[in-house]
């Protein structure tokens, strides 16, 4: 593909070319989206060096996801910015840990960390892909308010005119959308089944594990999980994943614990 063809191609065409092994296509995507990405990075990180590093690592992560058979199929900028946010949060947590403990790892610890790094990358790509799938499963209004507040750091006052509601309404909508995303993140981890009884249980298992179902709908799921070994194993896995998420704010809600 010529340089002119690269520049004139759509993101979808370039992503397809990357999947076929065309490195030049990914270079075009980088030039096309790196500038806006750095502007967003400037909202999260102070130093230009960190901002450039965040964008570079995010692009590398997205490329690894594409080569692994997942990654974006169309909206590459949206996927890229979500990746950047995950990385920025991870960096912040790591920096806080270093600041708190102030310890220097031994050489053996560094060697162990290097050996485990590839496994950590695979896990991060898996979690990112699930988070992206969960986000895309949400209603458009929820996706919009999450994108504006979490990625673009817009205030409820800025978003209110777009939605035709008050800033307090935006804040309430954002809170519901965040909880919906957590439930969806768990739900995308639920494996499919051909058993009709298990299908009914698993259809709302992410919400149930988060304590988001009313009692009359939650009770049959709880009873089925105690009888079905397969669904019990799924529920235990989701409960473990749920421990990494912020607790639910549902009034009186109680999350499932195996």
Image: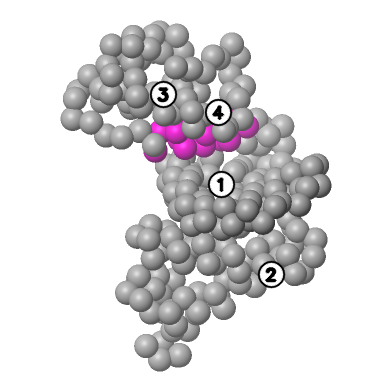
C-alpha gap between disc 2 and disc 1: 26 Å
Q: Residue at x 22, y 19 (%)?
A: 197
Disc 4 or 3, which lies upstream in sequence? 3
The residue that mark 2 highlights is 52
Front position among marks 2 and 1: 2
The residue that mark 3 highlights is 236
C-alpha gap between disc 2 and disc 4: 33 Å
The residue that mark 4 highlights is 243
C-alpha gap between disc 2 and disc 3: 40 Å
The answer to if 252 sits in the magenta stretch is no
Disc 2 or 3, which lies upstream in sequence? 2
Question: Along the horizontal axis of the image, is 96 left or right of 124?
Answer: right
The span picked out in magenta is 175-188
Residue 212 position in % (x across, y down): 49, 20
Disc 2 or 1, which lies upstream in sequence? 2
C-alpha gap between disc 4 and disc 1: 26 Å
The residue that mark 1 highlights is 144
Question: Along the horizontal axis of the image, is 244 left or right of 189?
Answer: right
Front position among marks 2 and 3: 3
Instruction: Look at the numbered disc 4 and give the secondary structure of its residue.
Output: loop
Disc 3 or 1, which lies upstream in sequence? 1
The answer to if 180 sits in the magenta stretch is yes
C-alpha gap between disc 4 and disc 3: 11 Å
Question: Along the horizontal axis of the image, is 14 left or right of 34?
Answer: left
Residue 72 occupies quadrant: bottom left
Q: Is residue 187 visible?
A: yes
Which quadrant of the figure contains the C terminus?
Answer: top left
C-alpha gap between disc 3 and disc 1: 32 Å
In terms of depth relative to the viewer, which is nearer, 45 or 119?
119
Q: Residue at x 63, y 51 (%)?
A: 109
């Amino acid at each position: 593909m010529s340089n002119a063809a690269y520049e004139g191609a759509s993101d979808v065409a370039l992503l397809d070319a990357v999947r076929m092994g065309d490195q030049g296509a990914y270079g075009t995507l980088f030039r096309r989206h790196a500038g806006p990405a750095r502007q967003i990075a400037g909202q999260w990180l102070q130093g230009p060096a960190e901002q450039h590093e965040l964008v570079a690592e995010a692009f590398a992560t997205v490329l690894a996801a594409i080569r692994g058979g997942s990654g974006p199929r169309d909206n590459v900028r949206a996927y890229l910015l979500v990746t950047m946010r995950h990385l920025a949060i991870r960096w912040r947590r790591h920096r806080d840990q270093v600041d708190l403990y102030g310890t220097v790892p031994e050489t053996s610890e560094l060697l162990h960390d290097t050996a485990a790094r590839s496994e950590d990358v695979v896990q991060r790509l898996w979690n990112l892909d699930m988070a992206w799938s969960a986000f895309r499963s949400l209603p458009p209004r929820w996706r919009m308010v999450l994108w504006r507040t979490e990625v673009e750091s817009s205030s409820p006052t800025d978003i209110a005119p777009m939605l035709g509601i008050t800033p307090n309404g935006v804040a309430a909508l954002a809170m519901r959308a965040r909880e919906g995303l957590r439930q969806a993140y768990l739900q995308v981890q639920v494996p499919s089944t051909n058993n009709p009884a298990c299908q009914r249980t698993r259809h709302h298992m992410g919400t149930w594990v988060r304590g988001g179902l009313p009692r009359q709908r939650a009770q049959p799921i709880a009873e089925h999980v105690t009888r079905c070994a397969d669904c019990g194993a799924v529920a235990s896995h989701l409960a473990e994943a749920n421990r990494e998420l912020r607790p639910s704010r549902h009034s009186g809600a109680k999350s499932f614990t195996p």
